[in-house]
Amino acid sequence: MEIPVGLGGITLLVLAVLWLVIFVPGLSKRSQLKEASHIAQSEIRRQREITKVTPQDQLRRLINTQRGFSALFGLFAVLTVSSAVGSALESAWWLAFWPALVLTLFFLFVQRAAGKKANQLATSLHRSRQSLKQKAQRHAPKNQVSREWMPNPLPSPMKSSTEGEMLEPIAQVIAIAKPKASMSSAEIDAILARRRAI
């Protein structure tokens, strides 16, 4: 079975059109996304440069640096000891011993330097806080009201002049001998009609 020559050209043309319709817009969108992410990253970098690093942030960074390099120092110290033990068994381990020893000493130096700088910064922050506290205490008014919690004073209970039962009744007490007759619905309607009229 033979395929006509023109069908291969049509197939290539259809594939080229599909390539242009499907893949080229995806590539342009990908370049737009890359450009947007590049702009966002440059904006973040610019904001970082503008913002001032506070001493607390600097102290936190130094402490994190000290911790990270302490971990690396421990890891490479173990590697140095294991390569020294391995070099006793085989001479090829000496190639791993010297770089591990150099890196171990480097990590130790960086860790010590970060710790020393963090200690100086923490000491200066503590001194500045203490000086501010002492300055505030010096400038505080001498006749300052106590800031301790005081309960609200309760009113004194009312005292009656006489104790026990009251001697005189406030209102006159009348005994009801005969109850009043209830109103009829016509009387109630008349009263309501007068009230609505007002």
Image: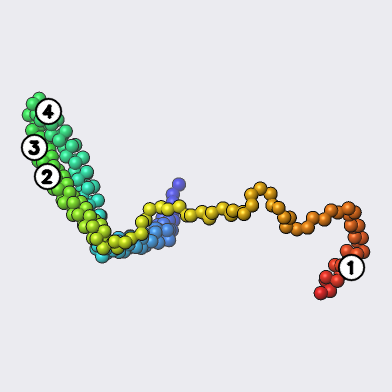
- Marks 4 and 1 in Cβ contact (< 8 Å): no
Badge 4 marks a residue whose secondary structure is helix
Say which amino acid is labelled 4.
Gly
Left or right: residue 113 versus residue 187 is left
Q: Earlier in the sequence, mark 1 or mark 2?
A: 2
Residue picked out by circle 2: 109
Residue picked out by circle 1: 190
Disc 2 or disc 3, which is closer to the eye?
A: 2
Left or right: residue 3 versus residue 180 is left
Circle 4 crowding by C-alpha within 10 Å: few under 14, some 14–19, many from 20: some
Please name whichever residue, 43 or 6, is drawn nearer the observer in this view of the structure. Answer: 43
Distance in Å between CA atoms under marks 1 and 2: 106 Å
Residue picked out by circle 4: 86
Q: Earlier in the sequence, mark 1 or mark 3?
A: 3
* Residue that sits furthest to the top in the current view: 89
Please name whichever residue, 138 or 189, is drawn nearer the observer in this view of the structure. Answer: 138
Left or right: residue 86 versus residue 57 is left
* Residue that sits furthest to the bottom in the current view: 198
- In percent of the image, x 89 and y 68: which residue is there? 190
Disc 2 or disc 4, which is closer to the eye?
A: 2
Distance in Å between CA atoms under marks 3 and 4: 13 Å
- Marks 1 and 2 in Cβ contact (< 8 Å): no
Residue 98 has which mark? 3
Disc 4 or disc 1, which is closer to the eye?
A: 1
- Marks 2 and 3 in Cβ contact (< 8 Å): no
Left or right: residue 29 versus residue 192 is left
Say which amino acid is labelled 2.
Phe
Say which amino acid is labelled 3.
Trp
x, y (%) of residue 107? 14, 43
x, y (%) of residue 198? 81, 74
